[in-house]
Amino acid sequence: MSETKTDSIVEAVRADLLRRSQFGIAKYGTTLDRTDLSLRNWCPSLRGSVGSMTINWNKVTCELAPPEGLSATDMKEQAARCPCRGSDDYCTCQNVPDRTTLEKRQSAR
């Protein structure tokens, strides 16, 4: 007999959804199965949830991946560390943060 595999991420999401459902039932005394609201009545709640999700997503992505652009100061500092000395506009030193720049950004947080 083959063993059934589970996905820890999916299981964590399922557990979180169950906790949220139980919280909502306790707070509002009903479930999403309620029939007293039209689809239009659900829109403000959905809009609020999507708005919160968008704001939270932007916060997380900004924290995890700083902007890829380079300031003029970054470009000058990276040029000093690069064999091209910044003379090649297509060189990565003028287009992408190097390790030192990324470390500097990380320590500034």
Image (cartoon, helix red, strand yellow):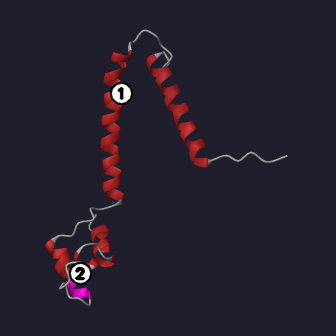
75 left or right of 29 in image: left
73 left or right of 81 in image: left
Identify the residue at image location x=21%, y=87%.
80
Percent across and percent down for residue 88 are 20, 83
Indicate which disc residue 106 carries: none
- Badge 1: how crowded within 10 Å, few (<14), some, or many (20+)? few
Percent across and percent down for residue 103 are 32, 73
Percent across and percent down for residue 28 are 44, 18
Q: Which residues are magenta?
A: 78-82
- In the image, farthest residue toward the bottom: 83
Identify the residue at image location x=40%, y=12%.
37
In space, the residues marked 2 and 1 are separated at their CA atoms by 46 Å
- Name the kind of residue labelled 1 in the image: Leu
Image height of 94 relative to 51, above or below? below
Query: Mark 1 sits on what residue?
Result: 46
SS at badge 1: helix
Percent across and percent down for residue 58 are 31, 48
Image height of 60 relative to 52, above or below? below
Identify the residue at image location x=21%, y=70%.
70
